[in-house]
Amino acid sequence: MADTIPGLLRDRAAREPDRVAIRVGANALTFGAWHDRAARIAGGLDVRRGDRVGLLFDEHDWLDFAAAYVGVQAAGAVAMPISARTPDPEVTRLLADFGAVGLIRGSGLDAQGRPVEEVIADRPGGVDVGPGDLAQILFTSGTTGRPKGVSATHANLTHGYHPRMRRRPLAHSKLFLHAFPLGTNAAQTMLFNALTAEPAALVLPRFDAEEFCRLVESEGAGTAFLVPAMAIDLVASGALDRHDLSSVVMLGSTAAALPPEIAKALATAFPKADIVNYYSSTEAAPAQTVMIFDPDRPAAVGQPADGDLKITDADGHPLPAGETGEVWLHSPTTARTYFGDANATSAVFRDGWIRMGDLGRLDDEGYLYLVDRESDVIKSGAFKISTLRIEAELYTHPDIREAAVLGLPHPVLGSVPAAAVVLRKPVDDLRAFAAGRLARHEIPARWLVVDALPRNDAGKVLKRQLRDLFDAPSEPAAPASDVEARLAGLWARALGRDVPAGADFFAAGGDSFAAARFAALATEEFGVEVPVSFVFDFPGLAAQATHLPDRRSAPAEADVPDGVPLSSLQEYFLRWLGETAEPRAVSAVAVAIRITDLLDVRALRRALDDVVARHDALRTVFPGGRAVVLDRCEPDFDEVFADDPVRQACTELERPFDLERGPLVRALVIEEGPEEFVLVLGVHHLVFDGHSMGVLLRELGECYAGQGHRLPPAGRAADVSAWARTRWPAAREFWQRTLDGAPAALPGAPRAAAVPAFEGHSVPFEIPVELSERLRKAVAERRATVYMGLLAVWAKAMAEWAGSDEVVVMSPLPGRTKPEFDAVVGCLVQSLLLRIDVSDDPPFDRLLPRVRRVVLDATEHQYHPYEEFSRRIPQPAWLRFERWGGPVHFPGLDSGPVELPRELMFAWPMPGPDLSVPELALTEHPDGRITGWLVHNRLTYAPPEIDRLAELVLAQLKEVR
């Protein structure tokens, strides 16, 4: 039958027996000889229908391989091409795993198997095979794991090929040239081209750029095929300039996406040729997309040539144009499968659709753009980073010959980009080059210069081997100067880890808080004023050493009171508590944790006692509004049985604290049953903040486990406050100048009433993923942070909602700019009043730089007497933003969070009509989602107005570009 591989060869041999099908050097194989040799190999095989036979041939043995391949199929068996580079033990494993009955090898190989000459019989043989019979098992590249066997029927392999075509494929050429190694899908495609196309196949056994170009010139090849690795080598070698390549009218690239910069170079070198990119896979063939290189769409890989294409979400639902998702191709014929692996088959092959394992998107005209291999996408913090995009930009450097990017583990971000490059000549500053073309989170945190990238037979980079190169121990690069060495030490302290030379501060895990910490450390280390903006402007170590400021402002007189110094927020709270005739209460910082494990309650009580004894803030009381640290102040600890732990927790936390005598720490263990407890911890905000809760839980776990003696001595909150107050005089002038004339409130907000009371209510708010991803991209391109972008959006939306030309936003910072402050428990949060002018109705791209400067200036002056300036701006627009740090739990025990009502202790009297505006509280999750709450006074605002504010925020986000 002509719709089988042996049938196609039989028909072609009958019509054109003397026509050359394949040439390798001086040796040629005609269709007649090919058919005769294949028939006699079939006659020499003792196999049954459906038996698997391995084929192990070197590229010099292409002619024998072609005969053996068809011969095995003509005998009714299944051909299993195996790369000659496969180690002998792996060949044995493949043969055993796939139940092969034998192995035929090329005559030039010293390997296991039966030489092809011994198989050839004197007489032809063969059986009738049909289109539905299994014809081939081809092994995947194994770049992400052990190779799988992809099986294909004759119908699949012969789809689109007909013995009596009016116009055969590649009819514009007399020869087509390739250098694909046997055992790859690309080589099999060339074999089928040789069987059915107009020109003969000219095979270069081993790719060499110079020889490839020489053959094009000497043979006048009209068509040539490459994989991207060969194309990269071709461009880098200079051979394109030394040969006449004008005969080529089509240059095809397959196996992977062709980097746009390489495609441009090929288009220049082959001026008469169409540069064609084929996108398919071993699993998907013959389904593919085809793209003739278009300078207006340099990164596109085309539209479906035969079959169909879709982009879906993780659940398989189709996505519209412009959205990134999983790429699926639909086979125009019987689809392939994974031989003997039903589970793997069901995950990839579904109703004729093939899951490509790539992420991509479609434009409005249906052109496909690949974002990355799904397994290669780097998930760094909240970002998903495309290695293909980074590689494409690196290829624009004139001295980068090859580049490969992968993700390396990072203790904070999960992973960060790293780049391995092959250089034409030494390059001074790769990081600086990347910084000019990539977003900050895309800049490789590590660089490795190698002689060659590890690749498989198909030219694909073996990222597992590449990762081993990064993991290999190496001598660290010595700092270029003493200043650079000292700066590197400060980086390590600010980031909590050593970083390699050439790294980027933010790519290495830094954020705005770490930048503020580094700036404080550098100011002390070098005796110069180092602003936070310095880190944003010069994120590289060498650049920082070059641009370090050279003067220091004269220190101002310290502003430290007698007795225990108060933090700025403590001063504010003490004033706020006494502003009304009816006393007000500050809510506790609290958590509830469900423990499904054995719990020793007495050991827990002792552990909490030990933690409280370690920290001065937890033993602080306020008789007469003055802070006093007690030598001993046991926490309030109770144990109850209850079937409604949330209600019981609320009752406990809403019970008033005694600020004058204490304690200001309380714990409640609610027992629901055997190994079923809820631990409630609440600490008054006057002595505690959100950051402190993490310290408390970590140390509580250590002490409960009997390891409290291993904890380092605890820092004193009073010392941190005293140090912070020494910064107040220098900051006071900045805040006076910044807030002079700022609006104390936003009276134009659409209030239903202005009452002297506050009752808090929270409305859920979520930013759609496509908007959050657009925001991340926009801020990264402008050297800003997600927080800065959200602040710009919030300020613009609030200004429109409240009818104001400017907005003052209150936003808290952890207040721990020194590493030694990290483990200090206390009320140390710094409150920033951020004044943002929107009177000129700026679009996002003009507002963001303005907001960035406001945030950086305020962060540099974060230690200031907030209580003093809060009187000027008593009703700012609040924005809280944090990154999700993982679920709350009790270290060492099976445990997880119990959600408490957000409105806990959210009601208090006001000294006058409440003019506050809603607060936006947001959390950025590891998967990229940004969720939160719009918090407002239910007595002041009607629900439709809160809904309108939410719509304004989303509308501003949609304007981000």
Image (cartoon, rainbow, N blue to C red):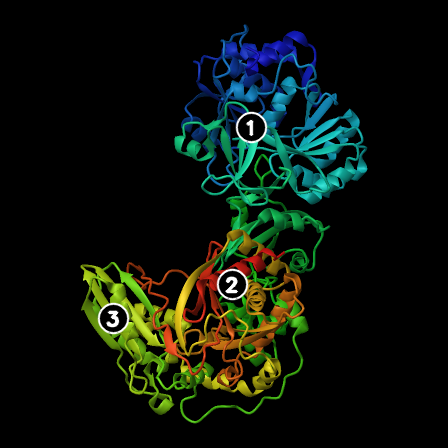
Q: Which residue type carries mark 2?
A: Leu
Q: Nearer the viewer, mark 1 or mark 3?
A: 3
For residue 949, which numbered disc appears in the image?
Answer: 2
Query: Residue beneath label 3, please?
Result: 668
Mark 2 secondary-structure assignment? helix
Residue farthest front in this picture: 752
Disc 1 target residue: 285
Q: Amino acid at mark 1?
A: Ala
Dividing the picture into quadrants, the one containing residue 633 is bottom left
* Residue 298 appears left or right of 159: right
Answer with mark 3 or mark 2, whichever residue precedes in sequence: 3
Indicate which label's residue lies in the foreground, 1 or 2: 2
| Residue 673 visible from this viewpoint | yes
SS class, disc 1: loop
Mark 1 or mark 2: which comes first in sequence?
A: 1
Please state which of residues 287 and 212 is positioned toward the viewer in this rendering. Answer: 287
* Contact between labelled residues 2 and 3, with CB atoms less than 8 Å apart: no
Q: Residue furthest bottom?
A: 562
Q: Amino acid at mark 3?
A: Leu
- Distance between mark 1 and mark 2 Cα atoms: 51 Å
Q: Are marks 1 and 3 in contact (CB under 8 Å)?
A: no
Closer to the chain start, of discs 1 and 3, is 1
> Residue 772 at what x, y percent from top left?
54, 56
Instruction: Specify the quadrant that holds the N terminus.
Output: top right
Which residue is nearer to you in this view: 882 or 112?
882
Residue under the image location 52 percent in, 32 percent down: 86
